Amino acid sequence: MKSPNVPRSLMLTLAVCQLILLTGCLTMAKGEREHISWENRDREYRVHVPPSYDAKTSVPLVVVLHGAGMTPLLMAWLTGFNTVSDREGFIAVYPKGTNNKWSSGINLPDFPGYDTPVDDVGLVGRIIDQMERDYRIDPRRIYITGASNGGMLTHLVASRLSRRIAAAAPVIGTISEKAMPDCKPDGPVPMLMVNGMDDPIVFWKGGPLFNDEKAKVLPGATVVDFWVRNNGCEPRPETAKLPHHGSQCGTRTHIDRYHGATPRSDVVLYAVERGGHTWPGGPLMQTQWHLGRVSRDFKASEVIWQFFKEHPKTD
């Protein structure tokens, strides 16, 4: 796929998905729509509470950030996190970006923050505050994940709210050159990154988004190195390859695990060889959206939740 066609393809993708959602052809998990005031704007988020929730017992919170142009409902469907929530007993919250996009250092006119400051990191913190008021949230188990534009914001939230976030898992999203100076965590943050090596939008080797030099992202390897150094990990990782289950998807996944003095130091990379701008283990129709190959070797949502379970805050 040629880069100039990406925005048009994404618009078509989202239009089709929203049509499917509106016609009820997909079974969407339940979620209450909530509103909050932030920076004199009305902001929206959706909450999914598992049936097992009991206000007498504290539960984990997972913040899930959608990609550019997506909606909270579409993100819930794409990832299947509500199903994992029902089984594992955590609450999932899906914030909504301005015009369905996030201010994550993408210096383009149609992204928030280009000409007017938008503090979406602060918004996430404010939503976490509200969730702690409305539900019995375990402060040691507050996690964040996101895809694409939401993955980029995940890096920023993990950096700037490092005292609150127990662990983070950005998917198909790195850090923009513009945002990198603001990435100054107060300490280690366990980090799980999932990236497609042939991502046609957020290039693994870095570079401009949509061929615009004002919107450059850092190479994935540079971002991994940033978290490895921040967390005090050994520079040489343990490596492994996942068994190949999806013969038709044409991808293979290798894992790099970096360790340090404590589990809080852990940095893990799932690198999907020949993988695209897709959610591994998600709907195969992602391939029809011209976003590249979808790995069938693992389910990103399951791997992310397992990583989160293993990394509560200990301080």
Image (tube, helix red, strand yellow):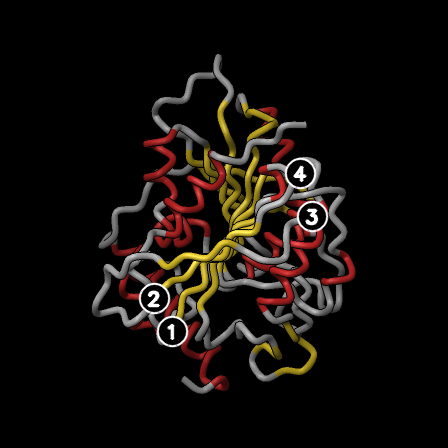
Relative image position of residue 133 (x, y in whole percent) = 61, 24
The CA span between labels 3 and 2 is 29 Å
Question: Of the residues shown, which amino acid type is indicated by label 3?
Answer: Gly
Label 3 with label 2: CB-CB less than 8 Å: no
CA neighbours of label 2 inside 10 A, class few (<14), some (14 to 19), many (20+): many
Quarter holding the C terminus?
A: top right
Residue 158 visible to the viewer: yes
In primary-sequence order, the first of circles 4 and 2 is 4
Mark 4 or mark 1: name the one nearer the start of the chain.
4
| Residue 295 locus on image (x, y percent) | 33, 63
Pick whichever of labels 3 and 2 is earlier in the sequence. Answer: 3
Q: First in sequence: mark 2 or mark 1?
A: 2
Q: Position of residue 91 (x, y in %)?
A: 46, 32
Question: Residue, x 54% and y 62% (percent of image)?
Answer: 173
Please name whichever residue, 148 or 258, is drawn nearer the observer in this view of the structure. 258
Say what secondary structure mark 4 lies in.
helix
- Which of the labelled discs sits on residue 274, or is there none? 1
Residue located at (32% from left, 32% from top): 87
* Contact between labelled residues 1 and 2, with CB atoms less than 8 Å apart: yes
- The residue at the point 57 percent across, 40 percent down is 35
For label 3, the residue is 232
Q: Is residue 48 left or right of residue 246?
A: right
Would you say 117 lies left or right of 278 here? Answer: right
- Using the numbered discs, state the Cα–Cα distance from disc 3 to disc 4 in whole angstroms: 29 Å
Q: Secondary structure at mark 2?
A: strand
The residue located at (73%, 55%) in the rendering is 183
Residue type of the residue flagged with mark 2: Arg
